[in-house]
Image (cartoon, rainbow, N blue to C red):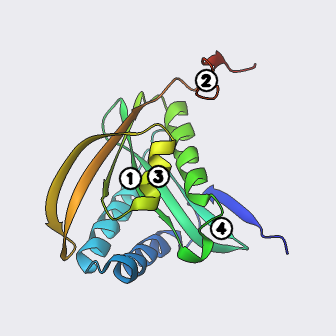
Amino acid sequence: MSEEILIRPLNRPGDLGWVVLAHGELYAAEFGWDTSFEALVARIVADYAAGHDPAREAAWIAELDGERVGCVFCVAADDRTAQLRILLVDPAARGRRLGGRLVDECLAFARRAGYTRMRLWTNHPLVAARRIYLSRGFCLVREEPHHSFGTDLTGQVYERELEPADVVSEPATGPAVPAPS
């Protein structure tokens, strides 16, 4: 049986609420995090909804057979740095490379928007997400223990440089070449 997978812009009624709900429920179930995490996600989503610049910030929803199963946001950290935020893939949809596709969408948008660097903040229990970030060229630049969301965590900041949108990267063995016209 064929599955229909779609990565689309976050732009439909219910998308914003689903992002908050899915984060709250999933992180409580998987990691025991309390509602302060859901509140953080709600603030991120509300800030985005209240006034993002579509030329500089975007968000996407992953769908599997018409149901929302994932998301990611790309927002401005500063003029030159984009921030990847609130990546999520529902457990029922994992193993289909949706997390990687969402991160790739975020990276491509950031390049087109003219950012030269991307940053993200995560926490140590998020092993699968970390694998995606490392496979996309992110490097750990800082770690710090903290107590948040009802538990002791190690916060991690990852960054990577972004090549301009008109340059296509070859596999790790080859040089970057100009994109075809």
For the point 46% across and 60% down, the residue is 128
Residue at image point 45% right, 47% down: 133
- Work out whether 53 lies above or below 92: above
Amino acid identity at mark 4:
Glu
Which label's residue is closer to the chain start, 2 or 3?
3
Q: Secondary structure at mark 2?
A: loop
Secondary structure under the numbered disc 1 in the rendered image: helix
- Numbered label attached to residue 131: 3
Q: Is residue 114 left or right of residue 100?
A: left
User: What is the spatial separation of the Cα atoms under label 1 and label 2, in whole angstroms?
Assistant: 41 Å
The disc label shown at residue 173, or none: 2
| 171 with respect to 156 (left or right) | right
Q: Is residue 162 above or below residue 132?
A: above
Q: Please name the amino acid that badge 2 sits on.
A: Thr
> Where does residue 64 sit, x and y in percent of width and height?
68, 70
Residues under numbered marks 1 and 2 in contact, where contact means CB atoms less than 8 Å apart: no
Query: Which sits earlier in the primary sequence, circle 4 or circle 1?
Result: 1
Q: Amino acid at mark 3?
A: Arg
Quadrant, the N terminus? bottom right
Q: CA distance from mark 3 to mark 4?
A: 22 Å
Q: CA distance from mark 4 to mark 2?
A: 33 Å
Depicted 40 relative to depicted 118: above or below: below
The numbered dot on residue 63 is 4
Judge by depth and name the residue closer to the eye, 87 or 81: 87
Name the residue beneath numbered marker 1: 51
User: Could you say which quadrant of the image residue 97 lies in?
Assistant: bottom right
The 10 Å Cα crowd at callout 3, few under 14, some 14 to 19, many 20 or more, is few
Q: Residue at left 64%, top 25%?
A: 170
| N-terminal label among 3 and 4 | 4
Answer with left or right where residue 137 lies relative to residue 67.
left
